[in-house]
Amino acid sequence: MPIHTRLTVAPHAASDAEFLAVPFGGDLDAAVELPIPLPALLAHYQVKGDAGEVLEIPVAQGDGVRRILLYGVGDSSAKDLRKAGAALTGRAKGRPSLTVLLPPEGDVAPLVEAALLAAYTFTIGEIKTKSVAEIVFAGGDAGAVRRGEATARATSVARDLVNTPASIKTPGWLAAQAVEIGASAGLGVRVDTELTGFGGIRAVGQGSVNPPCLVEMSYEPASYDRHVVLVGKGITFDSGGLSIKTSEGMKTMKTDMAGGAAIIAAMGALPEFNARVRVTGLIACAENAFSGSAQRPSDVIVQYGGRTVEILNTDAEGRLVMADALAYADAELDPDALVDIATLTGAAKIALGTGIAALYANDEALAAQLLAASERTGDRLWRMPLIDDYVGDLDSDVADLANVDKRMTGAAGSVAAALFLREFTGKRPWAHLDIAGPARAEKGATGFGVRLLLDWLSP
């Protein structure tokens, strides 16, 4: 597993734990005897109890030293609890064990989730950075602890998929991971390699020696009252095709399947969350390469369902594979709602930076639900406008649509991409998450979207 840290749940904190973390205001006297009264220590160090604040107190333990970590949780909001959990794991880096006495009240799942995710590492070969080997959570609600662990594990699965190099991560490899994860979770998984009618996926993948495919994952609980289809972009490497990117622009393009990874990981975790909604996950997988067989600017393709699209820029490939999957969902799966997630446009990153994803939606209730889940989970969204005045920019002289603004100005690029996708949703309740900014961090993949989707789909 990408999180190498073991998790243990104990009813009480071990009195001999080498690293023992206790929240400010927690029952420290029951866990350890301090050489100086606690109020005097807090006053001396001017402790405020802010989220992420950690005061380390060394105390004698036989011939050695044990460390007491007093930690702040701020206002105990989910955001502050995550900050506290990450800070504790950082302090215990390289240690064999950390015992965390959890706050006695409130939902501790965010703290557990963040503590485990802070221990995430991804290295091919020898692991150079070792986190704490084990975290023991004492006290708190055991169910909340397990929920935090399940969320962290699912998020780390997405990170692992995204961080895997494209030399390994072909469309077929990504599909195989979905099959394995789905089988472990008891899901139905189907991989379509024939792609009859899927002109967008076939066109994007035709320039690569690694053939494209469409993955369909199915979660169906015993009872449910709605059916949601999730659509993810699974471009395992994006060179830009014949509209080639710069060398610098390609360096992060193994991560261009982050939306698909989020769906694979979330689908695999749904049974653990007892989600009472039927969910179908579609991951459109392809490698956008350049070769003699690659699609060309000026080509016209036929998307699923018959709409024709003029290709003006082969680097706007994500919307082509997503359009096929959306049109298929509308025509064949009869969903109550469609949600797609993709690293779709650099314009979204320019507009909102690396901390927030762009949300587009044609349904107010669906948008409100996703925004609420965003606030709860920390996968932040910002509602963006679907400006109908810009639809005409996607007109083509030879096809139903062009895949980019025919004037090639690049203006409102994220809006234009969302408007393009909307054309294939059949006017069903639909939301589009452009995660080009927050899917990637300096140290690798973030797993953005997994927590959001699990929260939205769970009771």
Image (spheres, rainbow, N blue to C red):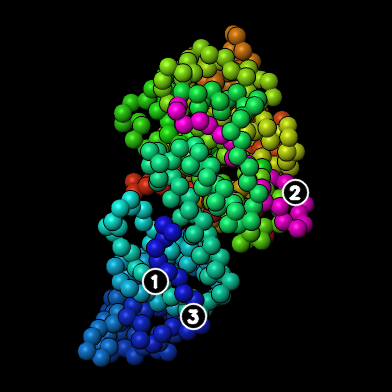
Residue ID at (40%, 38%): 166
Q: Which mark is residue 226?
A: 2
Query: In the image, what residue type sits under mark 3?
Result: Ala
Among the 4 quarters of the image, the one containing residue 29: bottom left
Give SS at disc 3: strand
Q: Are marks 3 and 2 in contact (CB under 8 Å)?
A: no
Toward the viewer: 452 or 199?
Answer: 199
Q: Quadrant of residue 64?
A: bottom left
* Residue 344 rendering spot, x and y as whole percentages: 50, 33
Q: Residues within 10 Å of mark 2 (few under 14, many from 20)?
A: few
The residue tagged 1 is: 134
Indicate which disc, 2 or 1, sits on the residue closer to the N terminus.
1
Residue range in magenta is 208-228
Dot label at residue 457: none
* Residue 33 forms part of the magenta stretch: no
CB of mark 3 within 8 Å of CB of mark 1? no
- Image point 32% across, 80% down: which residue? 18
Packing grade of label 3 (10 A; few <14, some 14-19, many >=20) is some
Q: Residue at x 40, y 35 (%)?
A: 253
Within 10 Å of disc 1 (Cα), the crowding (few <14, some 14-19, many 20+) is many
Task: Mark 2 vs mark 1: give the one in front.
Answer: 1
Residue labelled with disc 3: 10
Q: Amino acid at mark 2?
A: Arg
Residue 212 lies left or right of residue 27; in this view the side is right
Mark 1: amino acid: Glu
Q: Is residue 42 visible?
A: no
Mark 3 and mark 1: span between their CA atoms? 13 Å
Number of numbered discs present? 3
Q: Residue at x 42, y 89 (%)?
A: 30
